[in-house]
Image (spheres, helix red, strand yellow):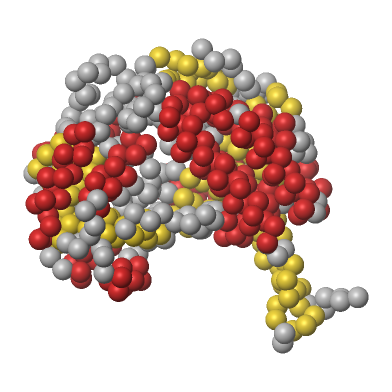
Amino acid sequence: MIEKRDFYIDGKWVAPLEGSEHKVINPSTEEPCTVISLGGAKDVDAAVGAAKAALPGWMATAPEERIALMEKLAEVYKSRTEDMAQAISTEMGAPIEMARSSQWGAGYSHLKNFIKAAKDFKFVKPLGDHAPNDRIIHEAVGVVAMITPWNWPMNQVMLKVGAAVAAGCTMVLKPSEESPLSAVIFAEMMDEAGFPAGVFNLVNGDGATVGTALTGHEDVDMVSFTGSTRAGIAISKNAADTLKKVHLELGGKGANLVFADADDKAVKRGVLHMMNNTGQSCNAPSRMIVEASAYDQAVETAAEVANKVEVGPASEEGRHIGPVVNEAQWGKIQDLIQKGIDEGARLVAGGTGRPEHLNRGFYVKPTVFADVTPDMTIAREEIFGPVLAIMKFEDEDQAIEMANDTVYGLTNYVQSSDGARRNRLAAKLRSGMVEMNGESRGAGAPFGGMKRSGNGREGGVWGIEDFCEVKAVSGWSND
């Protein structure tokens, strides 16, 4: 069992004022790995009060001083790579090799990108030559409530904290109760880096209690939430009474359009991308939509690749996928796999139940369905597990129609050697991001979606802008 830690409020570790205790379960073993305190409304009031009190001084701090603290945080973050990796691997089941590279690395790269963006960010700039005495000021939005999920803990924490720090906001973080260990370590890092008391505060809790208290709090100026669409809708309603700014990064059901002229590795790349992080990514390419002439070969290849994906405990070294995060998620995925079978999709890899060599832990077989139709449940619902649905299209227009036929709009993917086609699709696919031919988005590119995938953008200059209010000033003195 890992030592229990409490809340970080106003620069100090403090015991909760109210609430209960919660066992954090290691999904690889189904055994408790630690116990955390879950706070209540009084803890939220204390944290928000500290953030509010620290706001005037922090907003007035020169951007160069904030950047210097971010650079110190980067040093501290790097020095605790193994601590962070072990925490993430234990709490949410990322294989330790992946936790050291991708999970830890996502947070580090976002922080470095924010440092670069902050150095170039113009907090005060002229409106234009036509108005020499007008200025546009980007000013911190204020106190920010941050609610983060368990699937990529440091990725989401740093996308919010890094931007807020650069903008001059103060903050209260409520991490998922499924992944609190990494957040506690992160709070230790913020403390070691020397951020002023009250700038960063941490309160553990569940969504119904701490999440509701935070998102409806009259002294919170902005909510930044990453999680399910269902929760995002509830947060928006709760925040509406105070008219606070609400930034939402929600679910997805990404389409991966594979044309007959795609490169030889396109299908394999798509399957492995889907299985990455055990399918627990909102931007996973969970619908592979293949041109008819290449369809049969794609199905055969996808099944072969999925059958070679190894599954094992997160603590073991090697390139395998781990468990899903908890029993509830495991049960939901099993139900959806069975739903796919019942609705007539053709199961070509995986299926229900645990892999044969694993009888304990929340492990899911890497699963591939072929002959999926757009009306099937597995084509419409976000499964959040290692389950791929393969569909067929006849021409480009149908491919676009099928890709856009979803309530989500986070990331779509295109595999084609035809550059003109790729450019046409980039314009017509209704999603916040489009990635083509396996090329990832560049450093500092904005992350975010359309429709029920949320609003706002995270990362780089767009992330900083989202944590700012825009103020128009006339009569500016140039003396």
Q: Quadrant of residue 3?
A: top right
Viewer-side residue, 187 vs 437: 437
In the picture as drawn, the residue positioned furthest to the top comes out as 1
Q: Quadrant of residue 361?
A: top left
Asked if residue 179 shows in the view, the reply is no
| Rendered location of residue 4, percent (x, y) | 59, 17
| Rendered location of residue 472, percent (x, y) | 72, 72
Viewer-side residue, 102 vs 129: 102
**For residue 368, side relative to residue 66 (left or right):** left
Residue in the picture at 72% in, 85% down: 129
Residue in the picture at 44% in, 15% down: 32
Residue in the picture at 28% in, 47% down: 269
| Rendered location of residue 53, percent (x, y) | 78, 42
Asked if residue 458 shows in the view, the reply is yes
Viewer-side residue, 57 vs 191: 191
Against 256, residue 128 (above or below) is below
**For residue 20, side relative to residue 91 (left or right):** right
Viewer-side residue, 329 vs 305: 305
Q: Quadrant of residue 31?
A: top left
In the picture as drawn, the residue positioned furthest to the front comes out as 264
In the picture as drawn, the residue positioned furthest to the right comes out as 479
**For residue 54, side relative to residue 212 (left or right):** right
